[in-house]
Image (cartoon, helix red, strand yellow):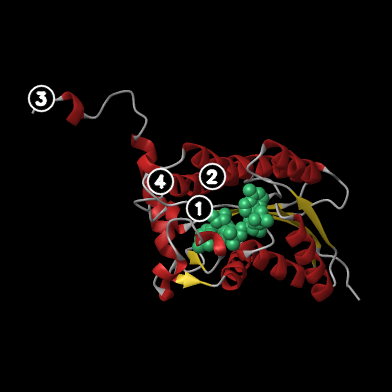
């Protein structure tokens, strides 16, 4: 018999990999789950299995988040007060690695629509709903490739860098609000995202690859601790703080009325 619900979590890309691990962990914490993905048969199977194992209510939204129609379906679910969402895990994403000069531009655009546009619009819908209700958490999934800029992953790495900058800006917007935001920056995970991406999982050193379950657990521990940026494998959090403080230290001198002397003085 299920106990009282801790709330409802909407997870995009919830049928596999990191999203499925989030669904398991949040259901175990007592959340009812809304799973979003494209493949309806896989959604139905995953939802039935999770509901059976966890005793939680698990519903599905079948939507392709690389299309405007699919994104709108999830925006509508977030706006609905019917079983209102408490936590958004903005997780669905795809990866593609290879030289830009050889890339299919339509595939690049699709990657940007899924990893950037859908994440942005879905977070905006959550921000609006959560602000109206005075509560809610937005969890955005970035990647270590945002920081460890890959030589043949310009679009994926840049899309994931967007997710960090976007969330850091949201954190300022919501600083005095009960709405919480977090960006998770996982390193390589043992998931199917690598299949056909241009880098295969077996090419990566085993010590660099984490299980999605461990990553989801670490990310939720980071959320519990109130972290804005959670990097599951980073041993010393001070390293991230130092990195971000170096960025902030540039602020007073990167917007001035005059060009720097090195650009104006003759050698
Ligand atoms: N795996 C890694 O090494 C790694 C590392 C750092 C960050 N990340 C990030 O973590 C997130 C999850 O990655 P993952 O490795 O867990 O991926 P994954 O194993 O490939 O699973 C992707 C999930 O998203 C769904 N999905 C894919 N395309 C979709 C679309 N167009 N519309 C709606 N749902 C879609 C899939 O279901 P359907 O196919 O049925 O739609 C599936 O549920 C991504 O944002 C990824 O960039 C992953």
Which of 187/241 is in front? Answer: 187
Nearer the viewer's eye, disc 3 or disc 2?
2
Label 1 within 8 A of ligand 1 by Cβ: yes
Distance from disc 3 to disc 1, alpha carbons, whole Å, reads 46 Å
Residue at (37, 37) in percent of width and height: 252
Label at residue 111: 2
Mark before the other along the chain sequence, 1 or 4: 1
Q: Are marks 2 and 4 in contact (CB under 8 Å)?
A: no
Q: Are marks 3 and 2 in contact (CB under 8 Å)?
A: no
Distance from disc 1 to disc 4, alpha carbons, whole Å, reads 11 Å
State left or right for residue 218 relative to residue 179: left
Residue 230 visible to the viewer:
no
How packed is label 2: few (under 14 Cα within 10 Å), some, or many (20 or more)? many
Label 2 within 8 A of ligand 1 by Cβ: no
State left or right for residue 185 relative to residue 207: right
Q: Quadrant of the N terminus?
A: bottom right
- Where residue 75 sits in the image (x, y, percent)? 74, 41
State left or right for residue 46 relative to residue 156: right
How packed is label 4: few (under 14 Cα within 10 Å), some, or many (20 or more)? some
Q: Secondary structure at mark 1?
A: loop
- Where residue 73 sits in the image (x, y, percent)? 76, 42
Disc 4 target residue:
154
Q: Secondary structure at mark 3?
A: loop
Q: Secondary structure at mark 2?
A: helix
Disc 3 target residue:
266
Distance from disc 2 to disc 1, alpha carbons, whole Å, reads 7 Å
Q: Are marks 2 and 1 in contact (CB under 8 Å)?
A: yes
Nearer the viewer's eye, disc 3 or disc 1?
1
Distance from disc 3 to disc 2, alpha carbons, whole Å, reads 45 Å
- Residue 203 placement: quadrant: bottom left
């Amino acid at each position: 018999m299920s106990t009282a619900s801790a709330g409802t979590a909407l997870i995009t890309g919830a049928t596999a990999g990191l999203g499925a691990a989030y669904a398991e962990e949040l259901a175990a914490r007592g959340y009812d789950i809304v799973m979003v993905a494209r493949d309806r048969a896989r959604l139905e199977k995953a939802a039935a299995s999770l509901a059976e194992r966890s005793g939680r209510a698990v519903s599905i939204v079948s939507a392709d988040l690389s299309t405007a129609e699919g994104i709108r379906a999830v925006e509508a679910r977030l706006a609905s007060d019917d079983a209102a969402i408490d936590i958004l895990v903005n997780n669905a994403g795809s990866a593609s690695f290879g030289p830009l000069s050889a890339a299919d531009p339509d595939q690049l655009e699709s990657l940007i629509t899924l990893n950037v546009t859908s994440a942005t619009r879905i977070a905006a819908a959550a921000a609006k709903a959560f602000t109206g209700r005075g509560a809610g958490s937005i969890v955005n999934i970035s990647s270590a490739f945002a920081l460890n800029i890959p030589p043949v992953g310009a679009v994926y790495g840049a899309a994931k860098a967007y997710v960090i900058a976007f969330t850091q800006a949201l954190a300022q917007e919501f600083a005095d609000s009960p709405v919480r935001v977090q960006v998770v920056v996982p390193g390589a995970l043992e998931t199917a995202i690598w299949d056909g991406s241009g880098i295969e999982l077996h090419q990566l050193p085993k010590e660099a690859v984490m299980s999605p379950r461990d990553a989801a657990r670490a990310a939720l521990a980071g959320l519990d601790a109130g972290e804005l940026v959670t990097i599951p494998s980073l041993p010393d959090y001070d390293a991230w703080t130092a990195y971000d403080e170096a960025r902030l230290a540039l602020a007073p001198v990167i917007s001035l009325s005059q060009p720097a002397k090195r650009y104006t003085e003759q050698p």
